[in-house]
Amino acid sequence: MQTQDLLAADTGMGAVTLRVADLDRMIAYYRDGVRLALLSQEHGRAVLGRPGPLGTSTSIVILEHTPGLAHASAHEAGLFHTAILFDSRADLAAALYSIATQYPQTFTGSADHLVSNAFYCTDPEGNGVELYWDRDRTEWSWTHGMVDMATIFLDPNDFIRTHLTEDALDSAATRPGRVGHVHLSVGDVGTAKEFYVDTLGFATTAGMGDALFVSAGGYHHHMAMNTWNSRGAGRRQLALGLGLVRIEVPGVDDLGALEARMRDAGVQTVDDGRTVAFEDPWANRIEVTAPGRG
């Protein structure tokens, strides 16, 4: 792939939108369990994330109340998990402690991935959530352009004992930082690579047969796709769960180059002056935006 066909190195992920049946219950989970702040709520839409000064709040999860929709089958394409990145192990431990004390039944596992420490949950409506902290990039190892990752047991109780501080637990300022990556369930990995790497412009950073990990700028992964539960899945029908994945590129020129690539590949795009939107092969909706657009 030509360098100009790759997403810019400073590309990152934006807020993930979920369609939900019980808005109050889901707000409570992400606010009291994950420790996101409720930034706004109106007209059946709640935005949760990290507050900041002078309008610099970071949206992380957007909940849209859609009670008329049904839950999708576990074997359909869609969201595998939203991965929320924490600035420090103390902040991560505070969220893990909140989950353990208020929503222990939602905890599903943990792992040291060499590049990160990760803890996994399933929210009250079945959406996967990863809470994680990254090791410094200088500690990551790469082999032939692929990042070395593993799945090593990580004791959540020991993590809390070692890293939880009173300041992190008590301070409203210690919030999750942002969406670090988004992991999707797809029908097949080959088609995912054609779309997310060959067309959209991510670079492959790891692959293990049934899963693909991709990123911009040498991050371990901004997105991942697997077929662990969804092999052979076709296009999604409108249902509860994933509503929208957002990608943020650093400049308007980067957004224009991306839209041109998508059009050249025959992908239908919609440009509303602020974002470029399109669907992947499984009807997962993607919106890409840049600062200063619109």
Image: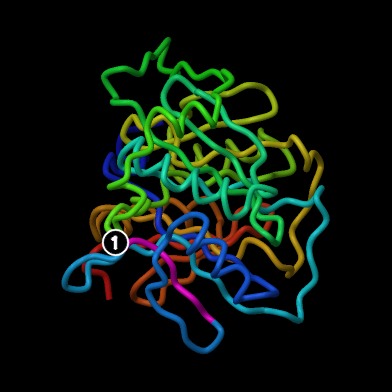
In the rendered view, would you say 216 is above or below 258? above
Q: Residue at x 54, y 18 (%)?
A: 150
Task: Report helix, strand or loop for mark 1.
Answer: loop
28 relative to 76 in the view: left or right: left
In the current view of this chain or complex, which residue is farthest to the bottom? 43
Tell me where residue 17 appears, x and y as whole percent: 53, 65
Tell me where residue 58 appears, x and y as whole percent: 32, 62
The residue tagged 1 is: 290
Kind of residue at disc 1: Ala
Residue toward you, 151 or 222? 151
Q: Quadrant of the C terminus?
A: bottom left
Most prominent secondary structure in the magenta stretch? Answer: strand
Q: Quadrant of residue 130?
A: top right
Q: Quadrant of the N terminus?
A: top left
Q: Quadrant of residue 139?
A: top left
Residue toward you, 30 or 4? 30
242 magenta-colored: no
In the current view of this chain or complex, which residue is farthest to the left? 54
Identify the magenta region. 45-50
Tell me where residue 65 appears, x and y as whole percent: 62, 79
Q: Residue at x 40, y 57 (%)?
A: 14
